[in-house]
């Protein structure tokens, strides 16, 4: 059986197993084991050696230590209710504008994304906090769902991002180090946030009934009070962002050291806000252990899957299809992004990353694409996987936490414009690669 047939069968079996609801990490490893045995003549010892040799480097990767530290930081901040105070301040400051509450949610989610890196925490927190208010103030349910779910996905892109740490661990290239990826992701993340704000402002200006301002009777705060509320709510999280990202971008600390600093800073912030308790630390630690185990199990399962796929010639088969049909580099890039986009509608971002990066990266290098630029295009594309039906995780995070008045129909209808905005964002960074390359060149001299 040739590598082309085996490669197709491997992906078909993987998709069927995922559709049957089996755990993703176990599914990846099981499919890899099955096809690895078929490919090497059922040589069990040889297959174990292949898995061990290719995963040993993962266990020695110091950068991956930052994953549980960033997750712990996010869990502590979530329980410390840092975002609630900022939302209350922006509610007062922006509530008088058409669409002002929606814009406030996007701003809070953008700040929260820079302190968490976990989409689930961002979406659930903002849903519990803001969706009842939006409903009460008369916002269109579809728009409300779209605002919360889309802005919540910024947590997977704006650093510190677990996805970027995993990507750096997969490639092991200097060009796609954690520092370079963090610097490269800042402007694309802010671009998407800006597109969301612009859309909400324009839509609510044209259709005020979709996002009415809060009544004048509720606008009682003076300008000085608004300034004080804004400064008081923004300084603590901004200080933490500066401590984490500033030390990485300044070259003072490694990502792992900065993650430890962030985890310590999150506990100090909780102490300052008087939400620091033994139960909070216990709950944060348990959630961190579970999430870290899930991420690293996926990392190992995805690694053995890609090792088997490449060892039986699947990578060469894919490269031959993409490079051997006289397709232009732009068409190949479009095809790779289309594959990532379609996979995002069905499986988790981590699995997509672990499956596609080892296959697509050599093709991108063969075509002469800048490794950092290509990495960020794929990562921005992967953000859409949280929104694309039928299995966009943010949609289910929202539905599980919102008031019963929101139906899945409202949610699906509401996220479509934001998916289009994400596609516009991907197009923009492809047309103007400076969105990606500028900050890494400033901080690290990367080109």
Image (cartoon, rainbow, N blue to C red):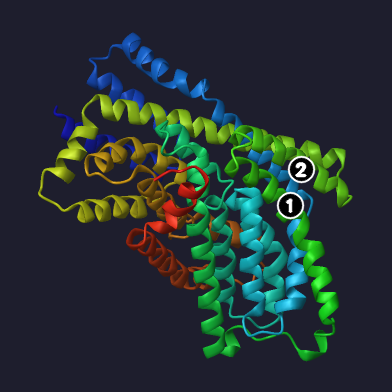
Q: Mark 2 to mark 1: distance in Å?
A: 9 Å
Say left or right for 363 vs 380.
Answer: left
Q: Quadrant of residue 146?
A: bottom right
Q: Secondary structure at mark 1?
A: helix
Taking the view exactly as shown, the residue that stands out farthest to the right is: 274
Residue 269 point in image, percent of width and height: 81, 48
Kindly identify which residue carries mark 2.
265
Q: Secondary structure at mark 2?
A: helix
Q: Is residue 417 above or below residue 221?
A: above
Q: In percent of the image, x 71 and y 80: which residue is there? A: 95
Q: Nearer the viewer, residue 1 or 232?
A: 232
Q: Nearer the viewer, residue 21 or 214?
A: 214
Q: Quadrant of residue 234?
A: bottom right
- Sequence order check: which comes first, mark 2 or mark 1? 1
Residue 78 point in image, percent of width and height: 73, 51
Kindly identify which residue carries mark 1.
239
Q: Are marks 2 and 1 in contact (CB under 8 Å)?
A: yes
Q: In percent of the image, x 53 and y 73: which residue is there? A: 410
**Residue density around tag 2, few if under 14, some if 14–19, many if 20 or more, within 10 Å:** many
């Amino acid at each position: 059986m040739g590598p082309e047939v085996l490669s197709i069968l491997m992906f078909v079996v993987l998709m069927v197993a995922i559709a049957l609801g089996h755990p993703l990490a176990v599914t990846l490893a099981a499919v890899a084991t099955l096809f690895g045995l078929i490919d090497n003549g059922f040589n069990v010892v040889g297959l174990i050696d292949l898995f061990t040799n290719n995963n040993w480097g993962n266990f020695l990767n110091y950068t991956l230590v930052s994953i549980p530290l960033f997750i712990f930081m996010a869990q502590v901040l979530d329980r410390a209710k840092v975002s609630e105070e900022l939302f209350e301040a922006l509610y007062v400051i922006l509530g008088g504008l058409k669409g002002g509450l929606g814009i406030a949610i996007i701003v809070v989610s953008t700040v929260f994304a820079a302190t968490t890196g976990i989409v689930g925490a961002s979406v659930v927190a903002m849903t519990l906090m803001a969706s009842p208010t939006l409903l009460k103030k008369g916002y269109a349910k579809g728009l409300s769902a779209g605002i919360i779910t889309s802005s919540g996905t910024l947590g997977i892109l704006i650093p510190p991002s677990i996805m970027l740490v995993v990507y750096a661990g997969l490639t092991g290239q200097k060009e796609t180090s954690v520092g370079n990826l963090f610097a490269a992701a800042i402007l694309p993340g802010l671009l998407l946030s800006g597109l969301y704000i612009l859309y909400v402002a324009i839509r609510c200006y044209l259709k005020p009934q979709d996002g009415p301002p809060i009544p004048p009777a509720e606008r009682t705060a003076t300008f000085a009070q608004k300034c004080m509320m804004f400064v008081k709510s923004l300084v603590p999280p901004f200080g933490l962002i500066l401590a984490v990202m500033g030390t990485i971008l300044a070259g003072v600390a490694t990502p792992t050291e900065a993650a430890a600093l962030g985890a310590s800073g999150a506990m100090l912030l909780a102490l300052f806000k008087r939400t620091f308790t033994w139960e909070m630390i216990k709950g944060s630690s348990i959630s961190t252990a579970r999430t870290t185990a899930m991420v690293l199990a996926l990392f190992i399962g995805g690694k053995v899957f890609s090792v088997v796929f490449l060892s039986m010639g699947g990578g060469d088969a894919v490269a031959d299809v993409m490079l051997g049909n006289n397709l232009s580099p732009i068409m190949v890039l479009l095809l790779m992004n289309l594959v990532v986009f379609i996979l995002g509608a069905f499986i988790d971002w981590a699995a997509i990353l672990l499956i596609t990066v080892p296959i697509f990266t050599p093709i991108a290098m063969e075509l002469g694409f800048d490794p950092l630029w290509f990495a960020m295009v794929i990562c921005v594309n992967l953000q859409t996987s949280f929104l694309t039906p039928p299995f966009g995780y943010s949609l289910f995070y929202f539905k599980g936490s919102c008031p019963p008045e929101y139906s899945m129909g409202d949610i699906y209808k509401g996220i479509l414009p934001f998916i289009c905005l994400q596609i516009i964002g991907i197009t923009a960074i492809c047309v103007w690669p400076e969105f990606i390359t500028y900050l890494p060149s400033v901080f690290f001299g990367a080109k």
